[in-house]
Image: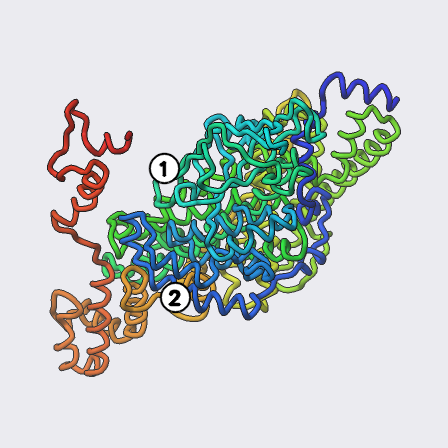
């Protein structure tokens, strides 16, 4: 029976076939807490016991010292306009070890933890090209590959120079026809024996979108290696290989720029008949053809560390700006933050900042503990970048004109402009969500899927029997578990904690059993077509993502001592997470397809889903409570919003000016309220609060000291809501300078001989 079933499954292609590149991707990294949700019965005690550490003293000192100093040294508006990192900043970064955070101490680096590197990247992410200059050497550069795969000689040759900043790396992967599908790269390396008898590689390639390429002098180049004479003993087509090339190598061309929508160094790399020794393969000739595995593991690092750090920073920066601005900016006689529509946006941003920070710390700690979870990393990349972008959009809506008008005092504008970059890079989020997360998770993290697939491909009847019997038992157990948990609304799930958050563990256990059973149903009924059913796969990815976020949120809350003041954020976050899971399930039920199973899910299934929901989302009252956590100065605001982003000085534009005004307004709240009340009652007659102060003092409504505080606060308030103004010369200066620098003509010479505008010509030269 099992033999005939195996043959039928294979003939009907009910299960997806795993290619060699897919197998290497599946084998890269490890299964972690993602496997708990695919099991259908997650061990919450184990998940809550995962490390949630603070930074070591030396790493915190680096953040409080050199990183904080860097924030105050940089003129962000000048950087935005010139896109050029000043020489003194380059020198500061080199002298203070910013390029060697990932490199072990024996090679001149700092040997920072994953959490430490993530924290530095989060704090510097608002510095545009400087933040990018710190990220690439510490995640996507040659150092990570050399540490993991390099020979002893390669480590000694390159790591000290990378740590000092003498070498600036870039990672040559993306091509015009190979983006997210990195396995299809066309760059060719052909092995040959040179006239001196040495084995070498002749490389021809054209790369684009390479971050730091214009300023780099060391390229990690991914190519398809061809060895027609089998000189390396790995066959004619060893496969994807990574080769190190230094700037100045004949035939290697780099230095030109693309012009990203946000300022950071990015450009093409070209190579024509570039000759390199086989010893320049990372790991030496023995690692020829192992590049795909290297790249999968390296990209996984970026997805877990650098991009989530930027996404979390976007959410925190938005919350840090929205809360104070909503209380400083007044409309209709009240702070705009007290209006429910505005408060709802602030609540969402504050709660998401709390959630995303919890996931950043939880996952970084997991990586430091030895886990390398590609599915969890993909979730963090996709969700943190998209949610960070959503937070910036909400922040721009709340700040309105102050967000739209550029200048030194614009707080969120540059982040808003650059948010699509993080969404797009290292695997566009569309593909990450609809293909990678559930596609890889369902095969790798499921306890029986991969053994079954391997047995089918190998025609191993005994292994197939063992796997399929286990799988059917697993599926039936989750069906029964889901029915019981659905009827009892999760009451049968054991919670590792008591108190107000216990109910969320019960609902997560309920959701996990449903998720696991639906996963089995999809793999049995949709099977090999799951790759094409991207929208269905994306909904599974959403459900998994929000189960992970709910778990990390609960871990943070209890790791930080279950602070009562954080409960408004936790309740909002958990109800929102469960609502997102509910929506994902509803979409799966509505679009599953199939004449029998599809009908059952679409009609009786959705009816039961809707009358017995996991969550209906946060209430209006919970919106107000969550928003209030970032609308008053204090420890909670610092910890939830501004913490980890730096402490702007009162004299600094943007956040410095805003926070200074906010503190003054908060301190003068009581006497200001007295004056406003008197104005409303008609006891005082004046056009505004400042004009009413003398009469209010004279009438003993406020004291002299209170009047002075109100005046200072109101003056600061008016200053904080002002936007930057430029005269004609300032407004046009940068554009004219760009034209002049590129064309070497006077600014007035706008058109060339054939009538093309000089700026357009400059872009095409």
Residue at 78 percent of width and 40 percent of height: 477
Give the SS element for disc 2: helix
Q: Can residue 296 be seen in this view?
A: no
Where is residue 377 drawn, in percent x and y? Answer: 59, 46
Q: How crowded is mark 2: few (under 14 residues within 10 Å), some or many (20 or more)?
A: some
* Residue highlighted by disc 2: 69
Q: Marks 1 and 2: CB-CB under 8 Å?
A: no
Closer to us: mark 1 or mark 2?
1
In the rendered structure, the answer to whether residue 635 lies left or right of residue 705 reads right
Q: Which mark is residue 552?
A: none
Q: Is residue 125 visible?
A: yes
Where in the figure is residue 519, as x and y percent of width and height? 68, 35
**Which residue occupies 64% across, 26% down?**
227
**Quick check: 765 above or below 610?**
above
Q: In this view, does 322 lie to the left or right of 55?
A: left
Q: Position of residue 9 (x, y in %)?
A: 77, 21
Q: Among all residues in the image, which is located at the extreme top? A: 11
The residue under label 1 is 256
Mark 1: which secondary structure? loop
Query: In this orientation, which residue lies closer to the viewer: 103 or 634?
Result: 103
In the depicted structure, whether residue 396 falls above or below residue 591: below
Residue 46 in the image: x percent, y percent? 71, 57
Task: Pick the quarter of the image with the C terminus.
Answer: top left
- The image's colour scheme reads rainbow
Badge 1 crowding class, 10 Å Cα cut-off, few under 14, some 14 to 19, many 20 or more, is some
Residue in front for this viewpoint, 343 or 198: 198
Position of residue 88 relative to residue 521, above or below, is: below
Residue lying at 38% horizontally and 69% vertically, measured from the top left = 633
Which image quarter: residue 224?
top right
Question: Where, quadrant-wise, is the N terminus in this rendering?
Answer: top right
Of pointers 1 and 2, the one earlier in the residue sequence: 2
């Amino acid at each position: 029976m099992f033999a005939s079933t195996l043959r039928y499954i294979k003939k009907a292609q009910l299960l997806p076939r795993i290619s060699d590149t897919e197998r290497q991707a599946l084998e890269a990294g490890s299964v972690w807490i993602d496997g708990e949700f695919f099991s259908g019965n997650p061990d919450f005690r184990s998940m809550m016991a995962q490390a949630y550490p603070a930074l070591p003293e030396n790493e915190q000192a680096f953040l409080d010292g050199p990183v904080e100093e860097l924030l105050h040294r940089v003129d962000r508006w000048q950087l935005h306009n010139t896109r050029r990192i000043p020489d003194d900043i380059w020198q500061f970064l080199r002298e203070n070890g910013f390029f060697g955070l990932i490199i072990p101490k024996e090679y001149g680096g700092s040997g920072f933890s994953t959490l430490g590197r993530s924290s530095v990247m989060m704090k510097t992410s608002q510095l545009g090209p400087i933040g990018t200059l710190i990220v690439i050497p510490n995640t996507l550069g040659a150092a990570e590959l050399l540490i993991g795969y390099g020979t002893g000689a390669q480590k000694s040759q390159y790591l000290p120079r990378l740590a000092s900043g003498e070498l600036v790396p870039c990672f040559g992967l993306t091509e015009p026809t190979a983006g997210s599908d990195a396995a299809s790269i066309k760059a060719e390396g052909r092995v040959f024996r040179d006239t001196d008898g040495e084995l070498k590689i002749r490389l021809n390639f054209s790369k684009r979108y390479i971050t730091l390429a214009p300023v780099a002098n060391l390229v990690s180049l991914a190519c398809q290696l061809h060895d027609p004479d089998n000189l390396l003993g790995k066959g004619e087509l060893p496969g994807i290989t990574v080769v190190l090339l230094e700037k100045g190598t004949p035939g290697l061309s780099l230095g030109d720029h693309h012009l990203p929508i946000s300022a950071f160094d990015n450009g093409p790399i070209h190579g024509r008949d570039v000759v390199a020794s086989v010893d320049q393969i990372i790991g030496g000739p023995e690692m020829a053809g192992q590049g795909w595995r290297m790249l999968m593991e390296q990209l996984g690092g970026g997805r877990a560390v650098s991009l989530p750090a930027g996404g979390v920073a976007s959410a925190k920066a938005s919350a840090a700006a929205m809360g104070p601005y909503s209380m400083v900016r007044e409309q209709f006689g009240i702070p705009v933050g007290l209006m429910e529509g505005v408060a709802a946006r602030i609540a969402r941003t504050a709660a998401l900042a709390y959630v995303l920070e919890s996931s950043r710390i939880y996952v970084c700690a997991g990586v430091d503990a030895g886990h390398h979870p590609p599915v969890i990393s993909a979730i963090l990349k996709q969700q943190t970048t998209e949610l960070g972008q959503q937070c910036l959009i909400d922040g721009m809506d709340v700040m309105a004109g102050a967000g739209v008008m550029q200048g030194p005092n614009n707080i969120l504008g540059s982040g808003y402009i650059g948010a699509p970059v993080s969404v797009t890079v290292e695997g566009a989020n569309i593909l990450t969500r609809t293909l990678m997360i559930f596609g890889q998770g369902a095969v790798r993290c499921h306890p029986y899927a991969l053994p079954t697939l391997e047995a089918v491909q190998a025609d191993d009847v005994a292994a197939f029997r063992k796997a399929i019997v286990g799988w059917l038992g697993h599926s039936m157990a989750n069906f029964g578990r889901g029915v019981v948990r659905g009827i009892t609304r999760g009451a049968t799930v054991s919670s590792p904690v008591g108190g107000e958050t216990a109910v969320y563990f019960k609902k997560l256990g309920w959701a996990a059993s449903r998720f696991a059973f639906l996963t089995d149903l999809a793999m049995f009924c949709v099977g090999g077509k799951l790759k094409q059913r991207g929208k269905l796969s994306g909904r599974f990815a959403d459900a998994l993502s929000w189960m992970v976020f709910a778990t990390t949120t609960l871990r943070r809350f209890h790791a930080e001592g279950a602070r009562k003041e954080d409960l408004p954020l936790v309740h909002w976050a958990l109800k929102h997470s469960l609502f997102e899971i509910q929506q994902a399930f509803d979409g799966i039920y509505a679009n599953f397809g199939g004449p029998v199973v599809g009908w059952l899910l679409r009609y009786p299934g959705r009816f039961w889903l809707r009358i017995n929901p996991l969550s209906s989302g946060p209430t209006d009252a919970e919106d107000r409570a969550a928003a209030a956590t970032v609308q008053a100065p204090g420890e909670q605001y610092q910890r939830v919003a501004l913490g980890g982003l730096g402490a702007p000085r009162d004299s600094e534009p943007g956040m410095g000016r805003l926070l200074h005004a906010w503190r003054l307004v908060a301190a003068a709240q009581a006497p200001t309220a007295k004056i406003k009340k008197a104005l409303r009652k008609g006891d005082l007659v004046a056009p505004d609060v400042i004009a009413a102060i003398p009469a209010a003092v004279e009438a003993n409504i406020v004291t002299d000291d209170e009047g002075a505080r109100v005046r200072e606060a109101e003056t600061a308030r008016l200053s904080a809501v002002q936007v930057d103004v430029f005269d004609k010369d300032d407004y046009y200066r940068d554009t004219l300078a760009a034209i002049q620098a590129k064309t070497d003509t006077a600014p007035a010479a706008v058109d060339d001989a054939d009538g093309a505008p000089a700026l357009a010509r400059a872009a095409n030269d």
